[in-house]
Image (cartoon, grey):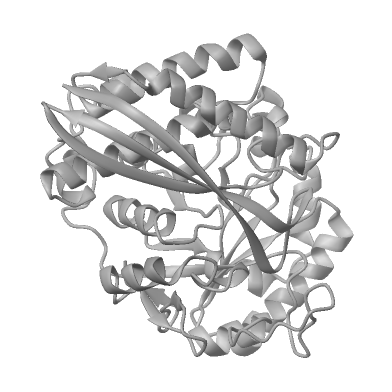
Amino acid sequence: MIRIARCRLRLQDLRLRLPFRYGIATVTDLTHAFVEAEVEIDGQHATGIAAEHLSPKWLYKRPDTSPEADNAELIALIETVLEWATGLEAPTAFALWQALYEKQAAYAQETGLPGLWTHFPVTLVERAVIDALCNATGQPFHALLKTNAFGIELGAVHPELAGTQPADWLPEAPRQQITLRHTVGMADPLAPPAPNNGGASIDDGLPLTLEDNIATYGLKHFKLKLGGNVEADIARTRAVLEVCAAHAPTDWAFTLDANESYTDFATVRAFWDGLPTDHKLRCLFIEQPLHRDHALTDAAGAGLAAWEGHPPIIIDESDGAIGDFPRALALGYAGTSHKGCKGVFKGVTNACLAKKRGALLSGEDLTCVGPVCLEQDLAVMAALGIESVERNGHHYFAGLSMFDTATQDAALAAHPTLYHRSAAGWPTLTITDGTITP
């Protein structure tokens, strides 16, 4: 049996080194949440930790509320879920997650709040419990996943997988290297001279412009943000692709992410038709072009069907609840994304379904930073076998400089292939030839 004896929430305000513009948000500051769970596992006590940004205007894109109001509401929701989770017990980690997930699903249906928003606190508890189980057994995530020590019942999420185990669908061993797919935000500078940050010089020694990032890290995969204005998106995308073509290795590729900015596929097609044909051949997929209110409707499916020869298109924000991924496949989407903020067990079951159906499962980022969130996220991505993973925490934050020296030293000692010391002394991500080693 697994029982959650106690949960604690700790918050830390962080400042980005340069603004991150995506969707309807331009982020300069945000809150980083740590959840610690004390767990009893068959009478043995263990502690697990999870962490994630409370990223403005992603989980819930309300244009009429302030980021501060959203933040306060989300923190209150996390605290409520931690209260519900305390004392909860179940035979397995998966069953414990199911119980909490179902309670939140009922809450989402009752309130009309989006699934991404209501289930986010559940994912924090879930990840802390997984971490506790790994600590209690002394086994890494991929080993417990392979033996299904988590008790994952694939058929309970996707009935067509009943009678199978995660090991039947997932790689024999985790990936040893991951290709970093570099996010190009809508406000990111492309070429020197680099701008300053709100009037303050950015002299932390890390690259700022897209050109500098390519030169420093050897980047070959890129994720371009779109804003929903066809002409502006065409111009910006063309400019970014020109930089990639001129400076990246010859095997460079890219994805496009509209963050729900478009309302129909006819408009998305108008944007796509404005891109150079030779560059379009390098596009791996388009991510979540339509708003979640429209993306899984019959009209969206009809729009996809009418677009002959369209590039692979996947959902991201629309994958807010169990059942959304199969619905997307039925409408003609090519796949979905995995993100830690959408849930680990949900991501595992989606990975198995994707393998069965021959669908795409991409790895996307919610600006993950260490010393907890990034490492846990990479462990899951590697276990699922995802080769190209969006990473941008190293770009928008100055390594682990925001944490105390003891934390920095511990992260560097625990993950010597993932981090190295910057010229300023704090750990920053090690990227070689566009890849990272989890």
Query: From the viewer's perspective, is 421 left or right of 184?
Result: left
Compared with 423, 1 (above or below) is above
Q: Looking at the image, which residue is at 52% across and 55% down?
A: 365
Residue depicted at x 64% and y 36%:
305
Compared to residue 333, the image places residue 421 above or below, namely: below
Using the rendered image of the protein, determine whether residue 161 is visible from the camera's viewpoint.
no
Of 130 and 75, nearer the camera is 75
Q: Is residue 122 left or right of residue 107?
A: left
Q: Position of residue 24 (x, y in %)?
A: 79, 48
Instruction: Identify which residue, 320 or 220, lies in the foreground.
Output: 320
Image quarter (top left, top right, bottom left or bottom right) of the N terminus:
top left
User: Residue 245 falls in which quadrant of the image?
Assistant: bottom right
The percent position of residue 2, horizontal first and vertical second, equals 20, 25
Residue under the point 32% across and 72% down: 437
Q: Nearer the viewer, residue 228 or 121?
A: 121
- From this view, report whether residue 323 is shown above or below residue 272: above
Number of disc labels = 0
Which of the 4 quarters of the picture holds residue 193? bottom right
Residue 412, image x, y percentages:
33, 74
Determine whether, in the image, residue 134 is placed left or right of residue 258: left
Quadrant location of the C terminus in the rendered image? bottom left
* Above/below status of 223 relative to 312: below
* Relative image position of residue 120 (x, y in whole percent): 52, 34
Q: Is residue 136 visible?
A: yes
Residue 211 occupies quadrant: bottom right
